[in-house]
Amino acid sequence: MFNSWSLKAKLIGAFSFCATILAFVGGISYFRLNEVVFRYDHVVKNNMGNYIAVSNVLDATRRLNIMIGRLTNSNLTVDQLRTEEAFLAQALSDIDAGKKAYLAIPFVDGEDSLYQPVDQSLAKVIEFSKRVLEMSRTNDPESLKKRDEFAYTYDTVRVPYREAMDRLKDFQSREADKWSKSADSAASSATIMVLSLVTVGVIISFVLGLFISTSITKTMLRVSDQLSSGADEVTSAASEISSTSEQLSASATEQASSLQETASSIEEMSSMIKQNSDNANRSSETARSGQQSVDKGKHVISEMLDAMNSIDAANKEISEVVKVIGQIANKTKVIDDIVFKTQLLSFNASVEAARAGEHGKGFAVVAEEVGNLAQMSGNAAREISDMLEQSLERVERMITTSKQKVEVGINVGKRCGDVLDELVVSVGDVNGMAGEIASACQEQSRGINEITRAMTQLDQVTQQNASASQQSASAAEQLSQQAETLRASAMELMQLINGRAQVGMVYQQPHAVHRPHTAAAKRKPTQLAGKTRKKAPGSADGVPNAQHEGFDEAA
Amino acid sequence: MSSSQSVNANTKKGADRHLIFALGSEEYSVPLLKVKEVIEVPDITPVPHTPTYYLGIMNLRGQVISIIDLRLKLKNVKQELEKKTAVIILDFDGFCLGIAVSAVNRVLALTEDEINERPTMETTENLDYITGVAHRDKKLILLLDVSKALNVEDLNLIHTQKTQQAA
């Protein structure tokens, strides 16, 4: 509930509470003091007045006593009498004054009963005195003697008066004692009460002041912390905005240059599209001529197929050659047989020559020669047959490969024909597509015009962006300055709250709280700030650090 | 030139003429004077209850002659009868025997210098039918005595043939 109050309300409440206590204490003190003053006043005015009046009356009556004493046993001259009369008159007027003074003061309970005897006895005393004086006006000794006798009876008047007077005096004395005692007690109790009230008020005021100042200081500290951290954040944000707007400006510039490049590219594109359109027309012409070429190609392929067929026929002739070679091989076998038989014959001839002994020697030589010739012709026949076999294999391989090739060639030719047919279709498609390309080119050139318009708008927007980014940069600078001002205000607030000496230390703490991960790093500077606080009062340590941190964050 | 040389060689003293033939890839020889005739492979009539190397009998101008597969006999490898295969008819003092060989190569006159003693060989068989080893043109030729190569059973068989023929 207390927190919902405004600061003004709090302060006003606190001070009015203190004022209330003060007024209460003052009122109590005033009333008690009044009471005491009243009592003492009573003592001074009533009791003391009574007492003095009684004393004056007593004094006057004592003078009457003296006068009576002087008159007794005396024979006064007229002058003396006159003196005594004056004396008596004086005493009587004093008594009257005393009585008046006494009666002026109001009576208390029981006083009247004491006063009446005094008054009566006093009247008797006065009567007695007057009578004594009257009786003294003669020079007759007898009457003087009578007077003396009468004077001797003074005690009958004087003693009751004296007793009544003593009682009154005692009463008055008691009254005075009573009133002074009550005044004393009232004074002491008032003192104690005022002292205790003052003590309680001081304690309550102190506690209240402590509480309010603590709560307000706490809140204001928090607020100023938030203010200073807010100022930091604003500073970093401002620098970020500044860098961002610089980047924006740079990118706007880049964009502008890119836009120019794009514009030139689009011009190139437009010219290329024109070329494309021309090329499309040309390619449709080319496609038409391509169709004619394909027709020619088909003719050529049919000729090629004829040529392939003739190659096939030639292959058949070559297989006839193979047959001839086989016949040659057979003939060679015949030669082989003949060679073998000749050899056998030569061996038999050798045998016969050996049987003939010396006579067969010449024949043996002949037989050997025949054998050798047979061997040679056998070798030759073997070589021929080997060569024939090789050439046969080769020719057969040739025929098979050429057959395969011819088949492949025929297939390829047929496929070529198919492909050429497809080509005819494709060329027709190409022709159509070229027309489509031409129309697409026209659409493209229309699109290019639109793009050019859009580029112009984009260029304007980019320029606006650039100016906007510059404005935002200046705004960021202003923001930064305002953040500085805010920081200064926060510092001022800190100084207001903590006094100048503690600002440096207090300023560091919010960072340690806001960034726990850097708390260890910050602890040293904080301690340093705490140490240097006594040497250099003010925020010389705290503020630059905070600024550096802010810039670091921005960077 | 070669003919005059061979004539000279043949007329050397102590030179014996030999018929060189092949069994597979090796060359063997028999003395030329033991040879009666060299013929092509004739029509051969197989004879039951004879060893496998005994090919059969043949008719040579009215004379019945036994034919032995010498390669199978000596090397235990069957002789394939093909075009080059020839049959050498040997004359053993009256009765003739045909041996089928892989090929008949040539006639050579071997001097005694060219013929070496049969070398000692690690075998349990009787190797008396090899009479010597001739070397010519870096090739070795085994000189054979076919009658020794044929054992008693063969000889008996041949003899029976001969007696039957005589009868």
Image: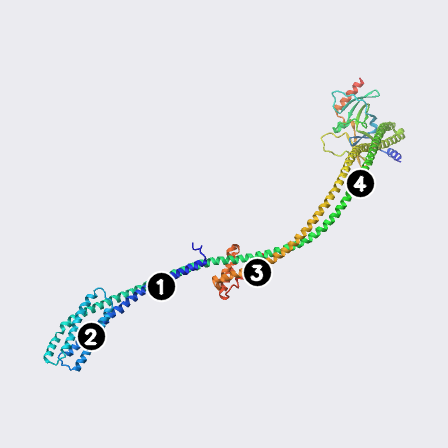
Amino acid type for the residue under numbered disc 4: Glu
Which residue is labeled 1 in the image? A26
Q: Chain of mark 1?
A: A
Earlier sequence position, callout 1 versus callout 2: 1
Q: Is residue A118 left or right of residue B56?
A: left
- Local packing at callout 4 (Cα closer than 10 Å; few below 14, some 14-19, many 20+) is some
Name which of mark 4 and mark 1 comes first in the sequence.
1
Indicate whether A129 appears above or below B107.
Answer: below
Residue at the spot of label 3: A481
Look at the picture and state if A68 lies above or below A287.
below
* Of labels 1 and 3, the one closer to you: 1
Q: Nearer the viewer, residue A374 or A542?
A: A542
Please report contact status of discs 4 and 2: CB closer than 8 Å, yes or no.
Answer: no
Q: Which mark is residue A285?
A: 4
Neighbourhood count class around disc 2 (C-alpha, 10 Å): few under 14, some 14–19, many 20 upward? many
Which amino acid type is shown beneath numbered disc 1? Answer: Gly
Can see residue A504?
no
Which residue type carries mark 2? Leu
Mark 1–mark 3 Cα distance, whole angstroms, equals: 54 Å
Q: Which residue is mark 2?
A: A92
- The CA distance from mark 4 to mark 2 is 172 Å
Q: Nearer the viewer, mark 4 or mark 1?
A: 1
- x then y, percent, for residue A162: 17, 71
Q: Are marks 1 and 2 on the same chain?
A: yes
On screen, residue A400 versus residue A136, left or right, reads right
> Is disc 3 placed on a helix, strand or loop?
helix
> Residue sitting at 19 percent across and 74 percent down?
A61
Q: Residue A123's x, y, as percent?
A: 17, 71
Label count reads 4
